[in-house]
Image (cartoon, rainbow, N blue to C red):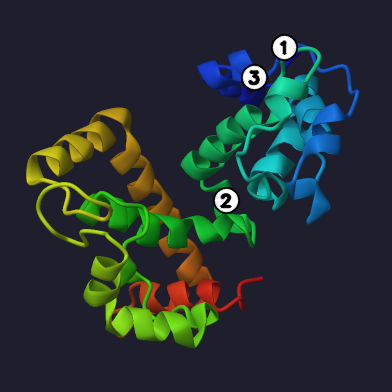
Amino acid sequence: MKSDIYKTLFQDVRLIEGLHACMNCGICTAVCPAAEYFEYDPRSIAVTVQSGSEEQIRALLEGDTIWFCGQCMSCKPRCPRNNCPGMIISVLRKLSQESGAFVKSKYGRQQYLIFKTIGENIKKFGYCVHPSSVNPETHPEQGPVWNWVYENMYRVYKAAGANLDGDGAGAMRKIPDQDLKELHNIFEISGGYELAETVEYYSKQRAIEFGFIDRNGEADMDQYFEFILNGENQ
């Protein structure tokens, strides 16, 4: 008998399309780029979900493993049974976020950073990454060249043929307000904003558990953000 958590996962059409009948051949793991860098085995994730085990699936939701996938979907065209572990992992990630399980994982907690950086960029600019958001103080790994580009970005981007924050056509152009509004509507209707609020809610709880509390007794999310960003997150 399959567990309730298994039944919940299969309410997502992506899992219905992504898991047909894994025969444990391991081809997905053999071609997986992430498996080159992490102790990561997408084959075992497909097998675990297929088993329907409540305990094992919950361990995936609370662990690091599901956050190693780069979502390249290299696994899909190689699988002899047309499974897609990358799609299975997408569903696991969403349930992990919705249930708050992600905050128990070092890599899962990084979801808060993603929503607050890439998510905010998309809302404000329509781009996943806008050059003004890559502050050298926050991103020292970019090196001294980026520091110079950051300080001279409009001149540099113009020289490269881009139209940074400009009206009309061109790379990095300003996205018209009407298009941004449409983008926000998509997030609203699709549940994107609701999911972001859920991630923030559980992240605040975790911040308090870690002792990041401001003068008012509320979660100090700036400290929590820096804690995760600086690799101190364990």
2 or 3: tag closer to the N-terminus: 3
Indicate the amino acid at tag 3: Gly
Q: Which residue is mark 2?
A: 102
Label 1 vs label 3: CA separation?
7 Å
Indicate the amino acid at tag 2: Phe
Q: Which residue is mark 1?
A: 20
Residue 39 x/y as whole percent? 83, 52
Q: Residue at x 8, y 39 (%)?
A: 178
User: What's the mark number on residue 18?
Assistant: 3
Label 1 vs label 2: CA separation?
26 Å
Label 2 vs label 3: CA separation?
22 Å
Given residues 172 and 9, the one toward you in this image is 172
Indicate the amino acid at tag 1: His
Residue 82 x/y as whole percent? 72, 14
Crowd class of label 3 (few under 14; some 14 to 19; many from 20; radius 10 Å): many
- Counting the numbered discs, the total is 3
| Image height of 223 relative to 144, above or below | above
